[in-house]
Image: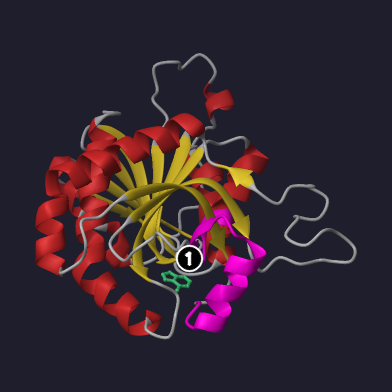
């Protein structure tokens, strides 16, 4: 095991198209989270598996190596849509990732979505984007799209990894963390540059977007950038809170004590299927 660090590296790797005849090169998967606790043991698992090259680019560290047999570039986006868009753009341009997976926590919005459940996004949208009356509310101006689809097969593989994780560890998780036995949901995830922490705010989101299952601060930005560059993406979120007045405390506890267990368990199963 060894590690190299290329601080400030500005040299992108060759893109898939530029590599041309080098058909044997396997393009890596980009794996992202906002905060360190949301990444679980992924970087440690990469280090345990072999050499890790860490490239610093735009004030973020990108760890290049193999995790659970799959070539990956692992990084932290930090919080919010701009941070997420900048980071996924670097994954695409500087690291030529074949696809992007984002893992982390979210607030539950759907009435049936409880703390400890998992939501795999089928579609994503920015709940705080509103250029009306010039463009319809929620629509990305000039792109003409409000809802971005996750890649169907990537999302299904991620959901299968979640189902497997819950089948094997759900009972123990519920006992350990005092939650109900977790369930896996698939559907709409909404993103905005706000931490939602009141009944009024979450009810307003429910009224505007009745099919929303979870709210967070990065997913739709990643989905938009991936759409624009034709890169498949999938987003998985564990529910840390219900976006009400209890959300700050619930989020903080869940983040530190539980989020990593979910991300590690889900990503191990997902990556082993790709290795
Ligand atoms: N991520 C986790 N909980 C959240 C909430 N309540 N609002 C926005 N993002 C979140």
State the residue at coordinates (29%, 58%).
39
Q: How many marks?
A: 1
Cβ at disc 1 under 8 Å from ligand 1: no
Query: Which x, y percent locates residue 202?
Result: 53, 74
State the residue at coordinates (44%, 67%).
78
Residue 83 falls left or right of residue 254: right
Residue beneath disc 1: 109
Q: Quadrant of the N terminus?
A: top left
Query: Which x, y percent locates residue 252?
Result: 30, 79
Label 1: element kind: loop
Is residue 272 rendered magenta in the image?
no
Query: Which x, y percent locates residue 11?
Result: 51, 46
State the residue at coordinates (29%, 51%).
183
- Residue 240 appears in the picture as rendered: yes
Q: Quadrant of the C terminus?
A: top left
- Ligand 1 quadrant? bottom left
Callout 1 environment at 10 Å: few (<14), some (14 to 19), or many (20+)?
A: many
Hey, which quadrant is residue 108 in on the image?
bottom left
The colour scheme used here is secondary structure
Q: Decide: is 221 above or below 73.
A: below
The front one of 230 and 126 is 126
Hey, which quadrant is residue 220 in on the image?
bottom right
Residue 149 falls left or right of residue 66: right
- Residue 67 appears in the picture as rendered: no
| Residue range of the region highlighted in magenta in the rendering | 196-220
Is residue 213 rendered magenta in the image?
yes
Residue 134 falls left or right of residue 108: right
Residue lying farthest to the right in this orientation: 134
Query: Which x, y percent locates residue 170?
Result: 17, 51
Hey, which quadrant is residue 249 in on the image?
bottom left
């Amino acid at each position: 095991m060894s590690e190299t660090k290329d601080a400030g590296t500005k040299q992108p790797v060759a893109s898939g198209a530029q590599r041309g005849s080098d058909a044997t090169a396997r393009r890596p998967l980009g794996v992202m989270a906002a905060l360190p606790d949301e990444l679980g043991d992924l970087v440690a698992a990469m280090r345990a598996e072999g050499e890790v090259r860490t490239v610093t680019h735009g004030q973020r560290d990108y760890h290049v190596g193999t995790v659970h047999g799959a070539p990956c570039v692992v990084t932290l986006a930090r919080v919010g849509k701009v941070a997420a868009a900048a980071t996924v753009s670097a994954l695409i341009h500087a690291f030529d990732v074949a696809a992007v997976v984002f893992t982390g926590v979210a607030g539950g919005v759907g009435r049936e979505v409880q703390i400890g459940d998992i939501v795999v996004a089928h579609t994503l949208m920015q709940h705080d984007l509103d250029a009306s009356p010039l463009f319809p509310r929620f629509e990305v101006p000039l792109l003409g799209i409000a809802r971005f689809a996750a890649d169907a097969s990537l999302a299904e593989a991620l959901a299968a990894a979640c189902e497997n994780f819950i089948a094997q560890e759900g009972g123990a998780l519920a006992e350990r963390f005092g939650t109900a036995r977790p369930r896996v949901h698939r559907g709409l995830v909404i993103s905005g540059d706000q931490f939602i922490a009141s009944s009024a705010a979450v009810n307003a989101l429910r009224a505007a977007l009745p099919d929303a299952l979870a709210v967070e601060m990065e997913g739709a930005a990643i989905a938009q950038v991936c759409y624009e560059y034709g890169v498949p993406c999938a987003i998985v979120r564990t529910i840390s809170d219900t976006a009400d007045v209890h959300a700050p405390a619930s989020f903080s506890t869940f983040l530190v004590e539980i989020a990593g267990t979910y991300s590690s368990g889900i990503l191990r199963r997902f990556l082993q299927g790709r290795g």
